[in-house]
Amino acid sequence: MIEARHLRVLRAVARTGSFSAAARELGCTQPAISQQMKALEKSVDTPLVVRSGRGMQLSEAGRVLLKHATGILAGLSAAEEEVAAIAGLRAGRVRLVSFPTASSTLVPPAVARLRDGHPGVRVSLVEAEPPESLAMLRGGECEIALAFRYPQSEGGSALPAPAHGTPREARAEANLEAQQLSAGTDWSDLVVTPLLDDPLVGLLPAAPPLAGRGGAVGLAELAGEQWIAGCPQCRGHLVELCAGAGFEPRIDFATDDYPAVVGLVAAGLGVAVLPRLALESVRPDGVSTVPVRTASGAPAVRQVVALTLPDLAEVPAVALMLERLAGAAGAR
């Protein structure tokens, strides 16, 4: 096998014309140069230098190998420099996948702070909800996925909410969707960086009869209301929370668009539960907000995390991005 160190010796011998001069150039002894040249000739199974009088020159095979060695050594030098730049955070790439509310709240300050100190590190962002974002991470489409999951509550495993009066076939489809969502919260093969617990907030119409409610609200108090729900995972958790409070919510509207949720609530068409992060990028005009409690009286929250693969967690740019995301969450 041809080694890079042997190619460097060959290049020095060709440039200087002797083993002793090559040794001086490379800072080693003449016997060491001789041994490495013998090892290289053994690797290719042909002489590479021809001695003539007091000097030497490359054989035909030596000239061919030198021609390739020049490009090989230049490529290795460039590779070493690029790797050193990545290790020293002078370069590198981090691809983020995030759900929308984290994209608008946690990602901007984290990326801005990283770029301030390390402008050579490139950061990109695309949006996807879990479990799609986890599939992208495991599939090599990103280095970090921001995701969330809901702690288990009293109602059992989460089920996506069927519409009011749904037939049995639709409920079977909802159960299948629940199994798929459950698979999206299996993080056992990933490195998990906790970011924050995002409280859930109840949205109530500002007009009577629900106007003016103060303090936290128990979901059982809203059992008779019509509901507006969001993404499948959020919908499933809403059903779980309500089941823990002893009722099945009547979900008449389902939308992932948070301004639409606020507009529907403001028009008196129902009540909703949204994460607090979602309200930071939406003007909650015409609605009142109240903390939400589970049936046990504990605050209802979702856990927001950053996920990566174990090997990726050792990459300097990825490790720094995780640190910056944790810092952005901790500063809230």
Image (cartoon, rainbow, N blue to C red):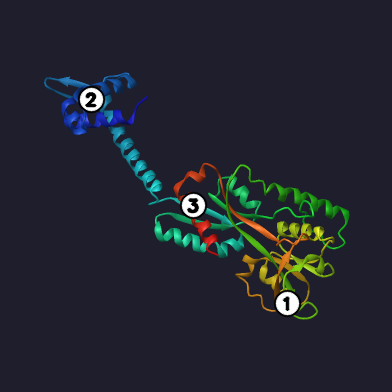
Q: Earlier in the sequence, mark 1 or mark 3?
A: 3
> Which residue is disc 2 drawn over?
33
Residue farthest toward the bottom in the current orientation of the protein: 207
> Which residue is disc 3 drawn over?
94
Residue at 85% from the left image edge and 63% from the top image edge: 164
Label 1 SS: helix
How crowded pointer 3 is (Cα within 10 Å; few <14, some 14-19, many 20+) is rated as some
Left or right: residue 287 compared with residue 7:
right
Label 3 SS: strand
Q: Earlier in the sequence, mark 3 or mark 2?
A: 2
Left or right: residue 65 compared with residue 311:
left
- The CA distance from mark 1 to mark 3 is 40 Å
Q: Quadrant of residue 7?
A: top left
Amino acid at pointer 3: Val
Residue 12, labelled with which disc? none
Q: Position of residue 293 (x, y in %)?
A: 74, 64
Query: Where the N terminus falls, by quadrant?
Result: top left
> Which residue is disc 1 drawn over?
266
Amino acid at pointer 1: Ala
Kindly tell me whether residue 18 is visible in this rendering. no
Residue at 82% from the left image edge and 62% from the top image edge: 163
- The CA distance from mark 3 to mark 2 is 43 Å
Label 2 SS: helix
Q: Nearer the viewer, residue 110 or 61?
A: 110
Amino acid at pointer 2: Ile
Query: In the rendered structure, are the residues bearing label 1 and label 3 in contact, judged by CB atoms less than 8 Å apart?
Result: no
Q: Is residue 267 above or below residue 133?
A: below
Q: Position of residue 218 (x, y in %)?
A: 77, 66
